[in-house]
Amino acid sequence: MAKSLPAGLLVAGYSLLVLAWVFSNPPGAAPDEPSNYVKAVAVGSGQFLGRPGNYPASAGAAFGLTGPRLARASLTTRWVQIPFRLAPEGFACDAFLPAVSAGCLQDSLPLANTMDQPTYAGTYQPFVYFPSGILTWLANDARTALLLARLGVALLCIALIAIAAWLLVRGRTNALALSGLVVAATPMVVFASATVSASGPEICAGLCFFAVVLRLAQPNRIDRWDWSALAFSGSVLALSRPLGALWLALGVLTLLLVAGLRPAWRRLRSGGLAAGVALGVVTLAVAAGFAWEVAFEPHRPTSLSEVLAFVPGALASFSQTFRGEVGIFGWLDTDMPALAYSAWYILVFTLVAVAAVLGTWRDRLVLLSLAVLSFVVTVVLAAGFVLPLGFGLQGRHVLAFTVAVPLLAGEILYRRAGRLPRIKAGHWMVAFTAVAAAVQAVGWFANARRYAVGVNGPADFIANAQWSPPLGWWPWVVVVAVGCLALLTAGIAAGRSTERAAGSRTEPQAA
């Protein structure tokens, strides 16, 4: 019970934060959200693809799509039919204008005069859009439909986060392994979980999947619930975005690194029918995603020489990608204060460093290998797939895998905390959650201010708001405050459970 309380509080905290982002972020105030919204509405009505056609140049310019970028967007564009009342007129009217508030959304806009709508997410895999799409048909206008679509994404993401938290504490003497989840769940994870996009489900499925991997790597009793978690998270990961199969393969590699080849094989064999069903479900999901990509997604061939030519640019942009993993909001035009990024960097490096000090040489080697692999994968994806198209690699594109590093560090911290008696592991958990909660609040505040009054507007954005969310700003301020308090309380509860376990000398010392 003691270990379940912090997990429950943690999930409650993230649920409240995601809810606040769902309602307080203006319509379309996220990368590609207008197109993803049209995609969701179409999928909800059974239009999984639509008809080919170029993306309008006038609309593309408002979203930064010109020249080669517009040409690329046109390759993935499909035209679909959605009801007039659900057309996203005026969404993202202040995109790439951080000094401008979302006040333009207050303008009275006419309904669309055609049911035909373009979406450059047209060729994207439709699978995770379906829950959101179904919900949009309950709405009588586009802004309500967008909120319902966001709620569809949020429910899926919160479920995945909840399962990850449950896996990290299940059958254990304390909740110290949750430290990895706290550090992995950056403000960008929360933001993506409240956005109409496949990125949120992909990232949260990555969190959940790597939590399953770490559980499989340990000598715990694995039952059908663990295999069910593997099937669910692995399927969502495979069906979210094109890189799902890669993240799954890297998850298998992580299992082999942490557990070793023979122990990993024994774990899989001991699962019996439940393991076979779970692996079969994930395999079918991978096949479905791969079939969709081959059939509909345009691919640009890239030579090795071209990839090598983009490597310097990929290396130069790595720091910005890492920053994006922590949180860059809006259309990548809304930053947090520099101190917030520094605090999260310190959080990550402290967790990894403490885990390295406490861990065995094998732990350190595996942790270092995962960190290096995260860096290499980020650079290769940027040089080989994104930069040649004229775009930059965003932090959300790789978070589904890079979350494995803090999750592993938290796992090591749980298993090895007793090796340094002078360090009270419970205090570390409180510190991690305190810093994380503060940065989550700062991130929401920075985004709220940007859309209420612009980034150069007064700090008291509530009294001077040019745009306000449903119910006004104060209810969502309260929701964020309670959510952050829940995170902090979870850290305190986890810290106490850790100290009680250490006092009873039941803490595991080796794996």
Image (cartoon, rainbow, N blue to C red):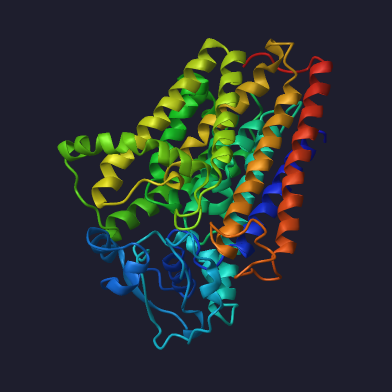
Identify the image quadrant of residue 218: top right
Left or right of residue 12: residue 390: left
What residue is drawn where x is 71% and y is 36%?
Answer: 434
Q: Quadrant of the C terminus?
A: top right
- The image shows residue 66 at horizontal and vertical percentages of 27, 63
Which residue is at 56% across, 27% downward? 408
Q: Position of residue 427 (x, y in %)?
A: 75, 25
* Residue 270 visible, this angle: no
Q: Is residue 406 visible?
A: yes
Toward the viewer: 346 or 137? 346
Give coordinates of residue 233: x percent, y percent. 54, 46
Q: Could you tell me which residue is drawn at 62 percent across and 41 percent down?
A: 164
Q: Residue at x 68, y 63 (%)?
A: 462
Answer above or below: position of 81 versus 17. below
Q: Foreground residue, 45 or 110?
A: 110
Q: Does residue 395 appear left or right of residue 5 in this picture?
A: left
In the image, residue 47 sits, relative to residue 442, either above or below, namely below
Q: Position of residue 149 (x, y in %)?
A: 56, 67
Name which quarter of the figure residue 49 lies in. Answer: bottom left
The residue lying toward the viewer, choosing from 306 and 108, is 108
In the figure, is residue 245 to the left or right of 302?
Answer: right
Count how many numbered circles sit on residues in the image. Answer: 0
